[in-house]
Image (spheres, rainbow, N blue to C red):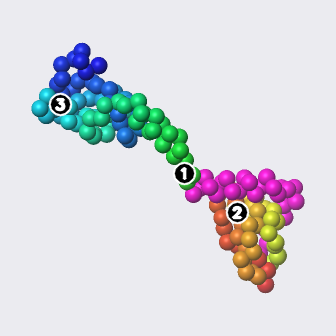
C-alpha cells in the first residue's frame, strides 16, 4: 500500500493499532527523515507511533481481545442475581411484605413499591437483605 503512493501527510496506510488490537487503516500525521513517525487510526481516532502490521502480533492481539471479559455494571449484576434467585424460588408462594412478620432465607416476598423479591440473608433478628429487580435492599422484619 505504501509503495504505490508517495509518502506524505494525509495518505492512508495500513498499520497496527494497539487500541483496536487489529490492523486498520490509518492516516499519516507526521513524517521525519522520509519515515512515518505518527499515524491516526481511522477506526478509533487514536494517535500513536506507526507500527507495521505484523501477522505474529495480530495473532497475539486477537488472543488478548478474546481473553478480555466484558465487565457487568453493578445494575446488570444485581439484575442477573435477581433473575437467578427468582428462577430458584416459586413466585406463586410469594407473601405480601409486612414489617411485623419474620422471614427466612429464600422466602419470596411481594413488596408494594419494589415488586417481587427474594430474601437473600437474615442480617439480624430485625433485618433482612432482599434482592429485587432494581437491586439489593435491607428491610425490617419482626418490628413491633
The answer to whether residue 96 is seen in the rendering is: no
Decide: is 121 above or below 78.
Answer: below
Q: Name the residue under label 2.
A: 131
Residue 83 within the magenta-colored segment of the rendering = yes
Under circle 3, the secondary element is strand
Residue at position x 40%, y 36% in the image: 57
Whether the residues at callouts 3 and 2 have beta carbons within 8 Å, the answer is no
* Residue 129 position in % (x across, y down): 70, 70
Where is residue 40 shown, x and y percent of the image? 28, 34
Give the left or right position of residue 87, taking residue 59 as reference: right
Q: Earlier in the sequence, mark 3 or mark 1?
A: 3
Is residue 76 shown left or right of residue 85?
left
On the picture, is 58 further left or further right than 6? right
> Residue 136: in sight, yes or no?
yes
Q: Is residue 132 within the magenta segment?
A: no
Q: Name the residue under label 1.
A: 71
How far apart, in angstroms, are the residues tagged by discs 3 and 1? 40 Å
Quadrant of residue 46 in the image? top left
Position of the N terminus by quadrant:
top left
Task: Identify the element where label 1 is drawn.
Answer: loop
Is 117 situated above or below 9?
below
Residue hosting label 3: 35
Query: Range of the magenta residues?
Result: 74-99
Circle 3 residues within 10 Å: few <14, some 14–19, many ≥20: few
- Please tell me which residue is depicted at 82% across the width and 72% down the height of the picture: 104
At horizontal 74% and vertical 67% (from top left) the residue drawn is 120
State the mark number for residue 90: none
How far across and how far down the image is residue 52, in percent?
Answer: 31, 31
Secondary structure predominantly adopted by residues drawn in magenta: helix
Amino acid at each position: 500500500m505504501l509503495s504505490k503512493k508517495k509518502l506524505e501527510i494525509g495518505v492512508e496506510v495500513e498499520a497496527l493499532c494497539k487500541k483496536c488490537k487489529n490492523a486498520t487503516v490509518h492516516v499519516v500525521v507526521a513524517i521525519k527523515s522520509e519515515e512515518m513517525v505518527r499515524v491516526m487510526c481511522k477506526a478509533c481516532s487514536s494517535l500513536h507511533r506507526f507500527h507495521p502490521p505484523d501477522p505474529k502480533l495480530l495473532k497475539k492481539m486477537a488472543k488478548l481481545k478474546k481473553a478480555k471479559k466484558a465487565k457487568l455494571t453493578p445494575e446488570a449484576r444485581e439484575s442477573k442475581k435477581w433473575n437467578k434467585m427468582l428462577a430458584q424460588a416459586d413466585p406463586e408462594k410469594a407473601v405480601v411484605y409486612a414489617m411485623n412478620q419474620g422471614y427466612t432465607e429464600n422466602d419470596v416476598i411481594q413488596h408494594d413499591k419494589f415488586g417481587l423479591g427474594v430474601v437473600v440473608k437474615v442480617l439480624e433478628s430485625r433485618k433482612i437483605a432482599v434482592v429485587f429487580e432494581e437491586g439489593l435492599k435491607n428491610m425490617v422484619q419482626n418490628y413491633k
